[in-house]
Image: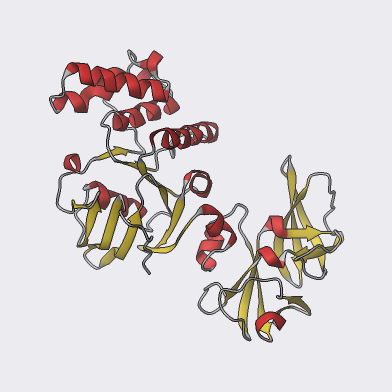
Amino acid sequence: MTATAKMDKPSVSVRGLAQSYGALQVLKALDLDIADGEFIVLLGPSGCGKSTLLNCIAGLLEPTEGQVFIRGKNVTWEEPKDRGIGMVFQSYALYPQMTVERNLSFGLRVSGMPKEEIAKRVKRASEILQIEPLLARKPSQLSGGQRQRVAIGRALVRDVDVFLFDEPLSNLDAKLRAELRVEIKRLHQRLGNTMIYVTHDQIEALTLADRIAVMKGGTIQQLDDPLTIYNKPKNLYVAGFIGSPSMNFLKGKIEGSGKTATFKLGSGKVALKDYEAAVPLKPAASVLGVRPEHIRVNTEKEDGASEAFKAIVDIVEPMGSDSLVWLKVEGQQLSARVESNQHFDPGQKVDVRFRINLASVFDEASGDRL
């Protein structure tokens, strides 16, 4: 499967990109256009090809097939230093014997840039990243978050068109990840450069991206803005990968067709008149996907909601601002996110309703959204 964004002058383009290691095909004839100034996230589990794609764009890997264009120039066989890119790695990749200032300026000094220009760029990057007090320290004297800021600064001083991030926050604890995530988003808003960001963390993807490319097996399963990815996943894989806790998947079958179609769930039926179908609905074995926050427990019927189903509370997980209630409905398990002031006990019988106007229906055989 390929995904191509329609745009006049993309900042980065890949065409028919494939990467193989013997019989193992890591990328499969992949097409992708990234707009000038866009923040795009390559999201997927380990082994899906996201870092391989980034490394092909960076010039760290030579693709088996296909081409890479940056600013309209074919850079497929160009050295990384000639591509107009800055790269930030997961491992920081700082020189331990050098101060922060020397780490920031090293690449510029090697290229023969005048001292005045180097000082100007280092000063600008350190101000943007708020690392001015750290310039005289060495990496061993820095926290993980500070080291990653320096790594970002080293890319920033190059004053390039495209920044590439390879899971830059993976080595940090949860609090630092959240803080640096905000800083990276603020950095993008301030600079307006094209940024390509690799991660397996869906929260990073949803909060940072203008568009997300969800990858699996060397292909892009869906390329869209975060809200569309979250609310209208293209297939079961995307739906299950995005969201924490994951979308609930209820097996059943569609009966009838069009706006009169219903989803048969055990002994009950869910009217699909409020569902926005991508294709005309017709009888078939199907899967109803409903996110936990789109399930109502012991509430009155509201617009877009289904009729009530009887359910039994299994487990309750208090989460502070809300609670996650695990339920059994028609022999299947699902989770519902409810307000923290709603109290439920294991074994309690309750009524549940599904927000069908916000749900997803998938063909069970192909996994595609209907």
| Residue 103 at least partly seen | no
Position in image of residue 147 (x %, y %): 38, 26
Q: Name which residue lies at 17% across and 23% down.
A: 109
The residue most toward the left is: 112
Q: Name which residue lies at 20% across and 62% down.
A: 64
Left/right of residue 114 with respect to residue 44 in the rendered view: left
Left/right of residue 167 with respect to residue 290 in the rendered view: left
The residue most toward the front is: 8
Q: Name which residue lies at 71% across and 43% down.
A: 319
The quarter in which the N terminus is drawn is: bottom left
Position in image of residue 172 (x %, y %): 46, 34
Position in image of residue 365 (x %, y %): 53, 80
| Residue 289 at least partly seen | yes
Residue in front for this viewpoint, 233 or 73: 73
The quarter in which the C terminus is drawn is: bottom right
Above or below, comparing residue 301 to residue 186 in the picture: below
Above or below, comparing residue 262 to residue 214 in the picture: below
Position in image of residue 301 (x %, y %): 84, 64
Left/right of residue 184 with respect to residue 160 in the rendered view: right
Place residue 220 in its image quadrant: bottom left
Place residue 330 in its image quadrant: bottom right
Q: Name which residue lies at 26% across and 50% down.
A: 57
Q: How many marks?
A: 0
Residue in front for this viewpoint, 118 or 309: 118
